[in-house]
Amino acid sequence: MAVKGMRGLSEAMRCLSLAAQPCRTVPVRQAPLACRRTMATEAPLPNITRSVTDAWEPTTTVPLTIHSFPSLEPQSLESWSAKHLYLPLRRDILHLAVVFEGDKTRQGTAFAKTRWEVAGSHRKVRPQKGSGRARLGTKQSPHLRGGGKSHGPRPRDFSTKLNRKVYDLAWRTALSYRYRRGQLIVTEDGLDLPLPDDFLELVQSNLLGRELEDGFIRKYVGDMMAAMEWGKEHGRTTFITGDKRSNLFTAMDIAGENGRALELDDVDVKDLLETGRIVIERQALKEMIKMHQSDLISRVAVKGLAKPPKYGQPLVL
C-alpha cells in the first residue's frame, strides 16, 4: 500500500513540473480568405430603406379617365382624391354595410293571431271529466286546428343601427375596390344606349310587333355586351345614371341576363359589389361621393383645419 501511495505521489509531482514549464510556441494557421464570386445573373439589391429624415409623402390623388359611351374612347383625364377612390379594402366595413341595408329592407309585417284574437266562443268544448277523452278548453286553443298560435310572429322592425360615418366609408371603400381592379368605368354625362336609326323608324311606324322588338333589342344588346366583354360570361354590368334613360333602362329590362340599369337614388353598397363592373356617369359619381363623405367633413368650424378633399380636377382635356 505504501509503494502504491509513493507511486501516485511521484506521478503527481511529475505533472506539476510539466505544468510549470513555459508553453512552446505553436505556429498558428491563418484562415483562408473568403472568395466571393459574382454570378452572371446576380443583380444589385435595390435600396429599399428610407432615411428617417426623408419626408413620407403618401398618395393623395389618383387619375380617373372619362370615357364616351359606347365607343369607350378616352375624352379627358381627371385627378380625384385617394380618400374617394383609393381606400384600402375593408371587408369588415363592407359586411356591416350590407347587413345594415338588408335588415333595413325587411318588411317585418308577419302577423299571427293568438288564442285571444281568434273569433268564436270561448266556452269550454266539453266537460272536464266523464267523457273518457282528454281534457280540453276552448276551441281557440293552439292545440286545435283553426286555433291561435303560441309565440307567433308579430309586426316588428328588423332595422339595425350603423354609424353614418362607417356607412359612408363603406360606400367609398366599395368604389375604391372597383377602381383598384379596373372595374369602375366612368362615362360622360348623358349615358344612354344608342339604337340603330332603321330600327327606331320601324318602331315609330308600328311595323314590328312587340315580340320582334324585344328580340331585336335582346340580340343587339347581347352582341354589344359580348364585344366589350361585359355580358353574363364576364359577370354582368351595372349601369348607374342620374335619372332614368328610356333606351338604356328598357334594353336592360329586356336583356337582364347581361346587366341592369339603376338610378342613383336606388343604388346601395350591395349593388356596387354584386356584378362584374360598374359603368357610371361622371355627375352621378360626383353626387354619390358628395352624399357619402361625412367622415371627411367636420361640422365644427376650426381655424387651420384641413379642407375636405376635392374631386374632378382636370388633368388632360
Image: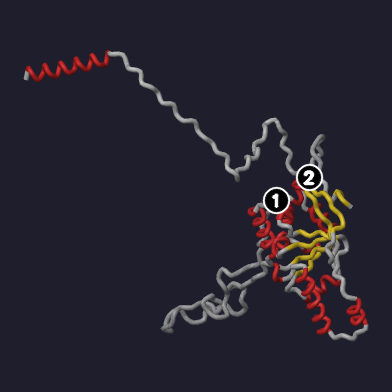
Instruction: Name which residue lies at 65% across and 59% down.
Output: 99
- Residue 217 in percent (x, y) is at 82, 77
Q: What is the three-letter code of the residue carrying label 1? A: Val
Q: What is the three-letter code of the residue carrying label 2? A: Ile
In the image, 90 versus 68, the foreground residue is 68
Is residue 92 at all visible to an observer of this figure?
yes
Instruction: Name which residue lies at 74% across and 68% down.
Output: 229
Would you say 148 lies left or right of 264 here? Answer: left
Q: Residues within 10 Å of mark 1 (few under 14, many from 20)?
A: some
Instruction: Name which residue lies at 36% across and 21% down.
Output: 26
**Residue matched to label 2:** 297
Does residue 306 sit above or below 231 in this rendering?
above
The Cα–Cα distance between marks 2 and 1, rounded to whole angstroms, is 13 Å
| Disc on res. 48 | none
Instruction: Name which residue lies at 54% across and 78% down.
Output: 138
**Residue matched to label 1:** 166
- Residue 195 in percent (x, y) is at 87, 74
Q: Residues within 10 Å of mark 2 (few under 14, many from 20)?
A: few
